[in-house]
Amino acid sequence: MTPQPSGLGPAGTKMEASTKTMTRSAKASEPAQEAKTWNTKNLGLRLASDFVSGFAAATMVAPLITIIDKGIMQNASGQATLKNSLKESLTSLALRPHHLLFSKPFALICMLYGGTYLTANTLDTITSTVQNRPATSVTSDTLKFAASSSANIGLCLFKDQTFARLFGPGGPPRPVPLPSYALFTLRDCLTIFASFNVPPLLGPVINRKMGDELQKKLSGQTIAQFLAPASVQILSTPMHLLGLDLYNRGQTGISWGDRWAIVKKNWAVSAAARICRIVPAFGVGGVVNSKVRKSLISRLE
C-alpha cells in the first residue's frame, strides 16, 4: 500500500495555498495601514498657534500698510499727492494713534493679512497632519499657492473696493468694474506666489552662495522672504494702477493711450510705495509669522 503524503491530500494543499494567500494579503495591507497614520498630536493647539502667529504678524505690520495703501489710493484718485497723504497720516499716527488703530481701514488690513497668513499656516498644519510629518514642517506646493491666493484675493478685493470708495474721487459710490477685479486678481496672484512659494525654493539657492560666517547671521530663506515679494511689485504695479484708473475715470470715453500715460506717470512712485508696503506685509510679516509659528509649534512636538 502506497503511503499517503502528509498535508491531508488535495484539501491540505488548498488550505496551505489559502494560508499563503492570506499572509501575502496581510503583508500587502501593512504599507497601506502605515500610510493612513496621521500626526494629530496637539492638533487643536497647533491650529491655535496658526491663528495667533498669523494675526500677531498682521497687527504688527498693519499701521504702515494702512497709511501707504491710503496714500496710493488718494494719489491715484487726485484727492492728495502721495507725499501729502503720507505726511498727514504719519502725523495723525504720532499724535492721535487711536484714530488709526480703531479705524475701518486698519481693521481691513488686519483682516486681509491675518487671513492670508492663517490660511497658509493652516494648510501647513493640515499637510503635516495628513502626511504624518513633523508639526513644524512647511510646504511650497501648488495647493498652498492656490489656497493662499484664494484667501488673499477674496479678502483683498473686498479691501480694495472699500478703499476705492473711501479714498476715491468724490460723488456717490459706484461698483468696481470687472476688468479692475481681474487686474487686482492677477496682481495678487503674482504677490502670493512670490511671497509663499518662491522663498522656500530660492532660500537654499541663496544659502549655497553665502559663506558659513554670513549664514550664521542671516539665512537665505530670510533674504528670499524680503527679496521675492518686493521684486515682483515692479511687474504688478501697472496692473494695480490700471485697475484703479478704470474705477476712477470709468471704462468709456478714455483711450488706452491716455490710460497708459497715467500708469507710466505714476509707475515709479507707486512701485516704490508698494515695495515699501510689501516688505512689511510679506517680508517682515512673513518672517514674524513663520518664526512665531515655529516657536509656538516646536513646543508642542
Image (tube, helix red, strand yellow):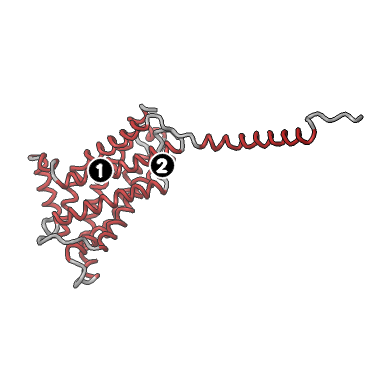
Residue 199 sits in quarter: top left
Q: Is residue 42 left or right of residue 106?
A: right
Horizontal arrangement in the rendering, residue 253 relative to residue 144 (left or right): left
How far apart marks 1 and 2 lie (CA) works out to 22 Å
Label 1: which secondary element? helix
Amino acid type at image mark 1: Pro
Please name the amino acid that badge 2 sits on. Answer: Thr
Side of 33 where 2 appears, left or right: right
- Foreground of the two, 274 or 108: 108
Left/right placement of residue 81 relative to residue 194 reads: left
Residue 240 picture location, percent across and down: 25, 58
Dot label at residue 139 = 2
Q: Residue furthest right?
A: 1
Residue visible at 35% across and 45% down in the picture? 196
Count neighbours of disc 2 (C-alpha within 10 A) and say few if under 14, some if 14 to 19, many if 20 or more.
some
Q: Locate residue 72: give its quadrant.
A: bottom left
Crowd tier of the residue under label 1, counting other residues whose Cα lies within 10 Å: few below 14, some 14–19, many 20 or above? many
Name which of mark 1 and mark 2 comes first in the sequence: 2
User: Percent from the top left, x then y, of residue 244?
Assistant: 21, 60
Q: Quadrant of the C terminus?
A: top left
Point 9% across, 48% down: residue:
88
Residue 285 in the image: x percent, y percent? 27, 40
* Secondary structure of residue under mark 2: loop
Q: Nearer the viewer, mark 1 or mark 2?
A: 2
Task: Write the residue at 11% across / 57% down.
Answer: 79
* Residue 71 seen from this side: yes
Nearer to me, 166 or 32: 32
Residue 290: image x %, image y %?
Answer: 33, 37
User: Badge 1 is on which residue?
Assistant: 280
Q: Residue at x 72, y 36 (%)?
A: 17
